[in-house]
Amino acid sequence: MMIEKIDGSTRLCGVIGNPIAHTFSPLIHNTIAGKCGQNLVYTAFNVKDNLDLAIKGAYDLNILGMNVTVPYKSAVIKSLVSIDKAAEIIGAVNTLVRTEGGYKGYNTDYIGLQRAMLEDNIKVEDKPVILFGAGGAARAAAYLVGSLRAKELFIVNRTKHRAVELGNDISKLFDKLSVKALNYDELSNIPEQKYTAIQTTNVGMWPDTDKVVFDDKKIYGMIDMAVDIIFNPEETMFMKNVKNNGGIAVNGLKMLLYQGISAYELWNDIDVPENVVNQVYELLKKEFEH
């Protein structure tokens, strides 16, 4: 749903990335604006280079707010006038909010993940957590795991040195959290207990839907609840394996939804009504129906 009339008072928001044609952000934000009756339009900007000029130009054009996606979530930081504490710690920004003199950077990926896990009753507090991956999304997830006071965190990555780097960074922030870095060959040695798992790699994403980040029935049997941040396909092989071994698993569609909702709320200083959130979620689900 779009606003009824675009005029001289219409505010503009958008997303910067490269490539960007695949983005679902315009669907999220234009639907919210239409249903909330706000004079706002959201579009996508394919920025191939000159990121700093693009950010300054957006500010000079009076653009209200921006999202930032691959490959600029870290590179954009040097173009900002300030940065939220959580985004600074994570080292990645996906939301720019207009302030005096420039944009302030936020990370709503971890907020989106937190809201999604809360809604789906995926528990972290006082639990051991397995985190698959060590990239930008994993950094946001690891920060969330520490913030929610998990008992211990096992970071599993194909290249162990990246897991070690992330583990060291998280240990400095949360000194009461036990953090261990592993590669996949070492995964079978983790203690036998019930884990919450967060899968942040792109393994199993469409079109390679038959792939899985690891294949060990014993480990799947120790996962009683899991989030895969992939949302296409609706059910990844990782999720199927968790479910087939008695656990519950959810995909990343609600994370996508809530990171967008949180950005919209930051730009407009409002709380998006729950009925609008639900309507946007239903629209997103229809996008992936085959």
Image (cartoon, rainbow, N blue to C red):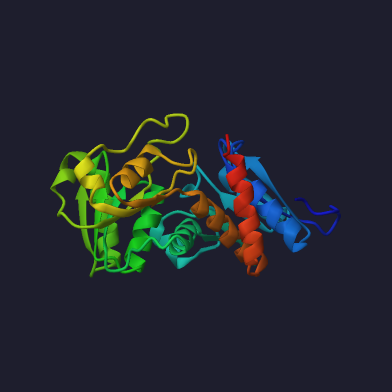
Instruction: From the top left corner, tell me how far across and down residue 35 is, in percent.
Output: 74, 59
Instruction: From the top left corner, tell me how far across and down residue 24 is, in percent.
Output: 60, 44
Q: Say whether residue 121 is left or right of residue 150.
A: right
**Is any part of residue 59 visible from this angle?**
yes
Which residue is pictured at 65% across the width and 69% down the height? Answer: 269
**Total count of labels:** 0
**Is any part of residue 133 visible from this angle?**
no
Q: Say whether residue 203 is left or right of residue 1.
A: left
Examine the image and state in which quarter residue 104 appears.
Answer: bottom right
Q: Say whether residue 263 is left or right of residue 158.
A: right
Instruction: From the top left corner, tell me how far across and down residue 130 is, in percent.
Output: 27, 53
Q: In this view of the protein, which residue sits in the foreground, 237 or 132?
A: 237
Compared with residue 130, is residue 21 higher up or lower down, i.e. above or below? above
Q: In this view of the protein, which residue sits in the foreground, 164 or 208?
A: 208
Q: In this view of the protein, which residue sits in the foreground, 34 or 289?
A: 289
Q: Say whether residue 213 is left or right of residue 46.
A: left
Which residue is pictured at 84% across the width and 54% down the height? Answer: 4
Which residue is pictured at 61% across the width and 41% down the height? Answer: 287
Examine the image and state in which quarter residue 11 appears.
Answer: bottom right
Instruction: From the top left corner, tell me how far across and down residue 5 is, in percent.
Output: 86, 53
Name the image quarter holding the C terminus: top right
